[in-house]
Structure formats: structure tokens, C-alpha cells
Image (tube, rainbow, N blue to C red):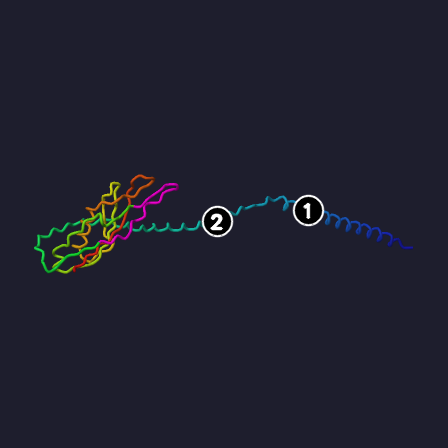
């Protein structure tokens, strides 16, 4: 009988146990080491960076609007001075007769006021005026024409002021008509029975016969 086989079986079992223990230790070491590395990685502090928002530069301010252009004011009105032309006396010619006729064109309506105000227009009667003298120079030059005058009648019927609305084309005739009109006296306009200033018109016709 041989006793060698049982001894080989005991050595083989001992070697197998050693191999198993070695692998178990190896697996334990691997697992513990890997887990520790994972924990260390997980425990590392995280770095955070705040990125500031890049704001675009503010837009340029628009240029101020140009100052408005102011229109130049109109020149002040300067009334023309009245020039009285004085002519030397001239001996009238017997061969020329001067005739003037006055044609009233009707009074200017007075200012209308609130009802029940009663107004009456001025009475413009050419018979209340003297015939103007024909300027001798105009007679010699045979100047004729019709002049229309607008005039302001005062509360006493006298002419306060007058102006030429249509000229004869000859200054001498126009001024002679204005002078003659200034000597006239009319019945003034009334408002509720009281005299009132008002404007009226009259025409002078200059003709030589």
C-alpha cells in the first residue's frame, strides 16, 4: 500500500486556500483603495467663477436741435407827413371857367353795438360844404379827375381827420379837396340818441368847362 496520495491532497488543499485568501485580500485592497479615491475626488472643493456681464457702452447723445429761426419783425409804420403846398397867387384867366361838383358816396356804417342799442348814421350832405377853389396851377395844366376821401366826423359834426382812398392822380387836386372837406360840417351819427364819432366817404370831381 502507498501513502503518498493523501499527502498530495493535503498540500493541494492548503495551496488552494492560500490562493483564495490572496485573491480576497487583493479584491479588498482594490475596493478600499478605489472607494477612498472616489471620496477624495468628491471631497475636493469646487471652484466657482463669477463672470461679469459685459454691458454695451451707452449710446451717444443726439446733438441738440438747432435754435429756431425767428422771423425779423416788420418795420414800424411811419405815416407820411402831410405837405401843404402853397402856390403863388395867379391871375385867373377869363377864357377858362372852373367848375367843381361834389358827389357824396354815402356814409360809412357806424360801429354796430349790442341790441337794443339804436344807432343812426351820420348825415353827409354836400350842400353843407363850400366848393373848393380850383388850384391855379391845375387850371393852367388842365388837370382833372375824381378823388375819393374817407373822413372821421366828430360828435360836433366837424371833420377830425381825412385820408385819400382814391387819388385823381394830381397831388394839388387831392390836397385842395382835403382842405375844402376840413371846412365842412355834418350831422354826426348817434347811439341811443347821443352823438357818436363815425367814418364817412365823399367824392370830389374836378373838371374844367
Query: Between 176 and 84, which is closer to the camera in this rendering?
Result: 176
Quadrant in the rendering for residue 40: top right
Q: Secondary structure at mark 2?
A: loop
The x, y position of residue 31, in whole percent, is 71, 48
Residue 191 covered by magenta stretch: no
Residue at 19% across, 52% down: 177
Query: Between 115 and 170, which is closer to the camera in this rendering?
Result: 115
Q: Main secondary structure of the magenta part?
A: loop
Q: How many marks?
A: 2
The x, y position of residue 20, in whole percent, is 78, 50
Residue 103 covered by magenta stretch: yes
> What is the number of the mark on residue 88?
none
Tell me the magenta residue range: 102-121
Mark 1 / mark 2, whichever is N-terminal:
1
The x, y position of residue 165, in whole percent, is 25, 53
> What is the number of the mark on residue 35?
1
Q: Secondary structure at mark 1?
A: helix
* Left or right: 85, with 196 as reference point: left
Quadrant in the rendering for residue 116: top left
* Left or right: 18, with 95 as reference point: right
* Circle 1 Cα neighbour tier, 10 Å, few/some/many (<14 / 14–19 / ≥20): few
* 56 to 143, vertically: above or below: above
Query: Between 181 and 163, which is closer to the camera in this rendering?
Result: 181
Circle 2 sits on which residue? 55
* Furthest-right residue in this view: 1
Residue at 19% across, 54% down: 174
The x, y position of residue 91, in whole percent, is 7, 55
Residue at 22% across, 53% down: 102
Quarter of the image where the C terminus is located: bottom left
Residue at 10% across, 60% down: 95
Amino acid at each position: 500500500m502507498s501513502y503518498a496520495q493523501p499527502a498530495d491532497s493535503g498540500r493541494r488543499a492548503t495551496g488552494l486556500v492560500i490562493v483564495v485568501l490572496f485573491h480576497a485580500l487583493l479584491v479588498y485592497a482594490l475596493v478600499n483603495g478605489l472607494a477612498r479615491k472616489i471620496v477624495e475626488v468628491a471631497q475636493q472643493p469646487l471652484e466657482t467663477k463669477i463672470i461679469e456681464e459685459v454691458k454695451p457702452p451707452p449710446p451717444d447723445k443726439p446733438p441738440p436741435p438747432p435754435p429756431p429761426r425767428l422771423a425779423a419783425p416788420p418795420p414800424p409804420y411811419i405815416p407820411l407827413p402831410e405837405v401843404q403846398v402853397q402856390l403863388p397867387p395867379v391871375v385867373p384867366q377869363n377864357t377858362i371857367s372852373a367848375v367843381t361838383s361834389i358827389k357824396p358816396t354815402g356814409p360809412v356804417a357806424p360801429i354796430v353795438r349790442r341790441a337794443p342799442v339804436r344807432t343812426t348814421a351820420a348825415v353827409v350832405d354836400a350842400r353843407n360844404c363850400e366848393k373848393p377853389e380850383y388850384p391855379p396851377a391845375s387850371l393852367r395844366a388842365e388837370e382833372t379827375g375824381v378823388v375819393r376821401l374817407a373822413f372821421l366826423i366828430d360828435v360836433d359834426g366837424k371833420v377830425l381827420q381825412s385820408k385819400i382812398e382814391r387819388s385823381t392822380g394830381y397831388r394839388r387836386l387831392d390836397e385842395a379837396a382835403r382842405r375844402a372837406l376840413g371846412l365842412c360840417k355834418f350831422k354826426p351819427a348817434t347811439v341811443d340818441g347821443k352823438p357818436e364819432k363815425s367814418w364817412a366817404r365823399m367824392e370830389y370831381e374836378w373838371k374844367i368847362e
